[in-house]
Image (spheres, helix red, strand yellow):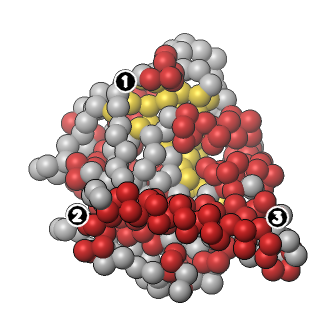
Amino acid sequence: MNTETKGLTSSSRRFITKQPGKTIWILYAVISIIVRIPFWLLIFVPAALRQQPQWTYRQAITNKVVKAGTYFYFSMRVAPTLSLDPGKEKERFVILEPAPAKLYLGVLEDNIITPATIGGTWYPVPYRKGAAQERVILHFHGGAYALGSGRDEDTAYTAKLLIQYVGDKVFAPQYRLCSVPSGRFPAALQDAVTSYKYLLDLGIPSSSIVLSGDSAGGHLIVSLLRYISEYEPPLPAPSAALLWSAYLDLVPHYGSVESHHSYTTDFLSHPLMDWSREGFVPEFMHTTDPYISHPRHPFATKTPLWVGVSGGEVLEDENAEFVMNMKHVNENKVELYAEPHACHDILGFGNVTGFEAEAESMAGVARSFLDSIEN
């Protein structure tokens, strides 16, 4: 049986997250991948035998390597450490203090998880107060709420595309992650409110701010829009929102990832998604809560939504369902675009998976959407 389709028991997971189990697991992973690479190199020479015949040789090989590697890595549940030290980002990394308490209402009020000081990275340079009006992209990185930092190591490629095709500057918050207990819901959403208020306090009008999010970041910006619509805090609606391969339903109701028809053409697997669900959803919240499962709970928003997905990813169905349901709400403006044949999150990982051209194509379509709503 293919290793990537097997689930790990709780005892097995405990074993591989500590030594010597972690070292044994890493050695097994390396050997397992190395042994299979020659087979992949040979079997994918004919285009007809690739995951999709339209794929290049590089795309077919990379898909297999990334899928296997991420399966093994995410199974270990190695929580990243988020630092408020500027690091190599230097003056581009800034510190954000929590906004006034009146902005954290209802679902954001929690006895344990409270608004916190976070960081964020500007691309290509920080916004300066009083500067000429620019389109600023508030981008929330992907990583299933368990990984990522918004820094160069995981967001530089994304920011480059966004600046080239969509906006003038990008601000990527380093929001709290659910890979540690202090990052469960509503931590990331509190940080989203903090980040949006930070941009407004710089003097950037809401008409110049575009929300953007890939994978779990897409879930987060929909949560922010839902929060603004539901609780009506003193925050204006942003001008637009761009979702890229959004992970919109953290507890999907259509079956397991492995049973999805696009599983063979995507690199997503259950270890990361299980980690996300178990760490993000508090015990007191139902798995069908609107802030967990966006497709099942449409809402009215003043912000136009552009939803981009790939035709070969397992999240395509939930994105299509979300768009369909949101369109049924009067006055919502929602547009769906599917990039044929690509896999998950090409905006975030197109340079790794070999889908650079497709990522640029998708970014160009997003730009056309923004131009259309401004005219």
The residue where tag 2 is placed is: 282
- The residue at the point 53 percent across, 61 percent down is 30
Q: Residues within 10 Å of mark 2 (few under 14, many from 20)?
A: some
Say which amino acid is labelled 3.
Answer: Tyr
Q: Secondary structure at mark 3?
A: helix
257 left or right of 335?
Answer: left
Q: Residues within 10 Å of mark 1 (few under 14, many from 20)?
A: few
Say which amino acid is labelled 2.
Answer: Pro
The mark lying in front, picked from 2 and 1, is 1
Which of the marked residues, 2 or 1, is nearer the chain's N terminus? 1
The mark lying in front, picked from 3 and 1, is 3
- The residue at the point 38 percent across, 30 percent down is 119
11 left or right of 297?
Answer: left
Which of the marked residues, 3 or 1, is nearer the chain's N terminus? 3
- The residue at the point 45 percent across, 40 percent down is 149
Name the foreground residue: 294 vs 103: 294
The mark lying in front, picked from 2 and 3, is 3
Q: Secondary structure at mark 1?
A: loop
Name the foreground residue: 134 vs 92: 92
- The residue at the point 79 percent across, 76 percent down is 43
Name the foreground residue: 339 vs 19: 19
Residue 57, numbered label: 3
The quadrant where residue 287 appears: bottom left
Reply above or below: 52 against 355: below
Q: CA distance from mark 2 to mark 3?
A: 43 Å
